[in-house]
Amino acid sequence: MSSEDVDNMNNETASANGEASETSSPPNGVADEQLPPAEAEPEEQLPPPQTHETEEALENSEDTRPVVELFVKAAVDKFRNGGCPTCHRYFLIFFILRERGLVDLVVTTFLPESPPKEVKEFSNGKHFPLVKVHKGYDSNGQDMTGTECDTIDEIETLISRFDSEDMLDRRQSPKEAMAEKSSENLYNKFMQFLKSETADPTPLIRNLEKVDAHLRETDNTFMVTDHLTRADCYVLPTLQHIRVAGKYYKSFEIPTELTCLWRYLSNVYETDAFKESCPADREIITHYDSKVPASAKKLMLRSKLMGDQRTFSIPSEVNGC
């Protein structure tokens, strides 16, 4: 993913962060507004809300392992994570670090109109994501206690302090660079397609073909290797948003001819990291409501938005790779 594409994603995220109302772990209230629902499709239901208590994590954590609290934008139900793609990216990254035994992870959802007290101590709470390290040491033995991050650059610097081969950036790993290059501009092309009145999908499809070609050439389960790494965390939120919002607003489907891309998504949907971090379809749809032309919007009763389905299906006509 190019720096331009990342900037575009972060800008889209920032523009969506002034909506809603209340907070914390568990977060409180959302404004009653008319919002478009996801089209009915028999998909996987989200698990019951998880209660992640910082105090419990601090008590149960090993003495030196960092306890990382990730603050992300809340969903309509005020408990789960919302449709912010940048929040999803870092949820994936820190979940993978947790799976590798490098951190203990606490995820706290809140809405910008009422950030929790601990957020106000180091941020205005109007943008996402945010990170605070409550205790622990990095891979070089340096104390990380009290480290606070309220910018993407600060979060990236924090991630670099963990000695994880899975989180090497494109400057450190040729394989990572190749994987990221295959998806650069994907989010940018998706946003152009979503905002366009003409709705020509050709540039978007060409960029999806690049990802498919990369997966075909490398023959890996995931973007870099046979387990999730940094490159996957960058491309997956975009692919899921293309599937859900692209279909809802533009009736767009990822072509079934892109068999390696579909195989990749099938593998991703089986991972704990994606199952835990992926927002509900309604959250992804709501994220783009103010970004699409009026002609693309579908006005329906807000009550129909309350389902928690997520699109994890794979078309039956996809065969092989």
Image (tube, rainbow, N blue to C red):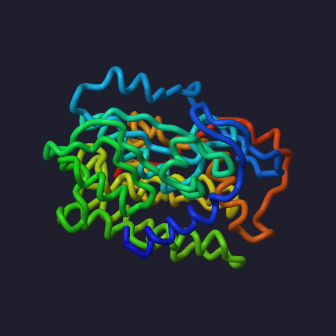
| Residue 91 falls in image quadrant | top left
| Residue 80 falls in image quadrant | top right
Q: Is residue 72 left or right of residue 301?
A: left
Query: In the image, what residue occupies the spot 69% across and 53% down?
Result: 286
276 vs 179: above or below: above
Front-most of residues 23 and 280 = 23
Query: In the image, what residue occupies the spot 44% across and 43% down?
Result: 70
Query: In the image, what residue occupies the spot 71% across and 68% down?
Result: 292
Question: In x, y percent, where is residue 172?
Answer: 17, 63
299 vs 193: above or below: above
Query: In the image, what residue occupies the spot 42% across and 39% down?
Result: 69
Quadrant of the drawing holding the N terminus: bottom left
Question: In x, y percent, where is residue 225?
Answer: 23, 50
Whether residue 32 is visible, yes or no, is: yes
Front-most of residues 183 and 94 = 94
Q: Is residue 100 left or right of residue 9?
A: left
Question: In x, y percent, where is residue 308?
Answer: 65, 35
Front-most of residues 26 and 228 = 26
Question: In x, y percent, where is residue 270?
Answer: 41, 35
Q: Is residue 131 left or right of residue 136?
A: right
Q: Residue furthest left?
A: 140
Whether residue 219 is visible, yes or no, is: no
